[in-house]
Image (spheres, rainbow, N blue to C red):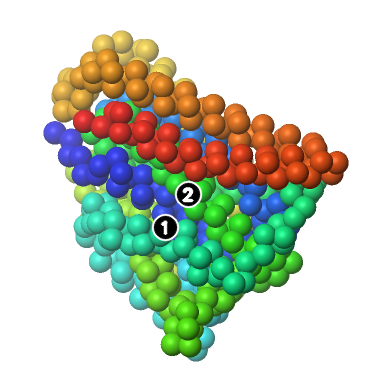
Amino acid sequence: MAKYFLSGRQLAWLVAVFIVAPAVINMPQHLARLAYMDAWVTQMLPVIYGFAVCYVYYRLAKVFPGKNFFEICFQIAGKYGGALINIVFLVHIWFILAKNTNLFIGFIKTNLLLRTPYEVSLFLLILVLIYYGKTSVEVATRVNDMFFALIAFLIITIPLLLSNDISIFQMLPIFVEPLPDLGIANALTASSYGDITVFAAFLPVIANSKMLYTSFRHGLSIAALLITWILVTEICVLGPSITSREIYPTYALIQQIHITDFLDRMEIFIFSIYFPSFIVCIVIAFLAILTGLGSFDRSNRPQAYNKTAGWFLLMTLVFAFEGTPEVSTFANYAYPVYVFAVQPLALVIVFLLSFRKKAREGSPTQDQKSSESNQPSAASFSASSIRSFRRWKLFTYILIVLGIASVIVGWMVAKDVQWIARVCAAVYMLVLILLVFTTYREMKSVET
C-alpha cells in the first residue's frame, strides 16, 4: 500500500523554497547584467517551462499511480534502458545538488566565516545531510513549514523596512532593454525552475495526481512572485548598476536595513531564518539521490546508501569547483545550457515511453489496480469540484497570456509612450499576484 505523507500546501511550499532559496543568492546579479533595469521581467517564461515539466510528472503519476520516477523508468524501459535513464537523471540531480551546495558554502565563506576552510563547512553540511538521510521527505517538509512562511513574509516586507532608501525612478524607463537580452535572461531563469526535476523522486507523496499537478503549479507561482518582488526591491534600492556588480546583491540589500540604532545588523536575524530553508533544498536533492539509488536495489531501501552517498558527495564536491566565481559562472551560464540540452529531451522520451507501455499493456496489472485503489479516482470528485478546477485553470492560462502580452506591448511602445509601458508593467505585476491566487484555488478545488 502506498503511503502519502504531504498535503498539497506542503508540496507547494517545498517547490517554492527549492526555487527561491538558491535564486536569492546570486541570480539577481546576472539578471541585472543581462537585462539591467528590466531584470525583474524575467519570470513569466520560466513559469511556463515549469508548468510544462510538472505536466509531464502529472501524466506519469496518473498513468503509474503509487510509483516514483525511477520505478516508472524501470517499468517502461526495462532493466537496462531504465537503468540508463535513471543514471542520467541521477547525474542531473547531482549537478543540482553540487550547484546549490557550493553556492551555499561559497556565500558562507565569503561573507560570514571568512577564516573557516571550505572543506570544514562542507564536511559539517554533509553530516547534516547524512542525519536527514535517515529520515524521509516528511521531516524536511516539517522544517520547511516552520521557516518558509517567515521567509516569504520577510521578502514581502523588505520594501517597508527600506522605505527611506527606495526610489522607483531607478526602474525607469521601463521595457527599454533589447528583447534578445530579456529572452536570454528568461532562459537563464527557466533553468532554475527546471530544478523541480528533483521532485520526480517524490511523485507518490501526494494522494492523487491532480493534487500533485496543482501543488506544483502553485509552488511555481509563489516562487515567481517572490523572486520578482526581491528583484524589484534590489533595483529600486541599489540601482541596476550596483545590483549587476555586487557578487551577492541580496546580502548588500539586507545590510541596508537599519531599524533604529539598536537594530542595525538585521542580516544576522534574516539569514538565520534563510539558512534552514536553503539546507532543506539541499536535503531534498540528497533524498532524491538516495531514492534513485534505492531503485536499483530490489529491496528498495534508500537509507542503506545514506552514509556511502554522503561521503561520495563530500569527495566529489571538494573537487567540483575551484572557487566561488567558478560556481557562479557554472550556475548561471554553463548549467542552463546543460539543462536545455538534456532535460527536455529526457522528459519527452520518458513521457512517450510511458504511453507506449500503457498502450501495450491495455488493462492495468494487479499492482496498478492495488495502487489505484489507494488513491481517489476522478469519479470521487464532485461535479462542482471538477467544474471549479477547470474554471480556475482557465483563469490561470488567461493570466499567463495577459502577462506575456503586457511585456510584448510594453516593449513595443516603451520608447515612444512610456506611460503605456508603465501600465503594462503594473499589469505584469498584477498577473503574478493573481497567478498565486488562481493556482491556489486550483489546488483547493481538488483537495480531498
The residue labelled by disc 1 is: 152
- The local secondary structure at tag 2 comes to helix
- The local secondary structure at tag 1 comes to helix
> Is residue 433 visible in the rendered structure shown here?
yes
Whether residue 270 sits left or right of residue 323 in the image: it is left
x, y percent for residue 216: 40, 39
Q: Earlier in the sequence, mark 1 or mark 2?
A: 1
Residue appearing at x 52%, y 27% in the figure: 397
x, y percent for residue 184: 70, 46
Residue appearing at x 60%, y 58% in the figure: 231
Whether residue 191 sits left or right of residue 152 in the image: it is right
Residue appearing at x 16%, y 23% in the figure: 373
Q: Nearer the viewer, residue 110 or 361?
A: 110
Q: Residues within 10 Å of mark 2 (few under 14, many from 20)?
A: many
Residue appearing at x 21%, y 44% in the figure: 5
The residue labelled by disc 2 is: 223
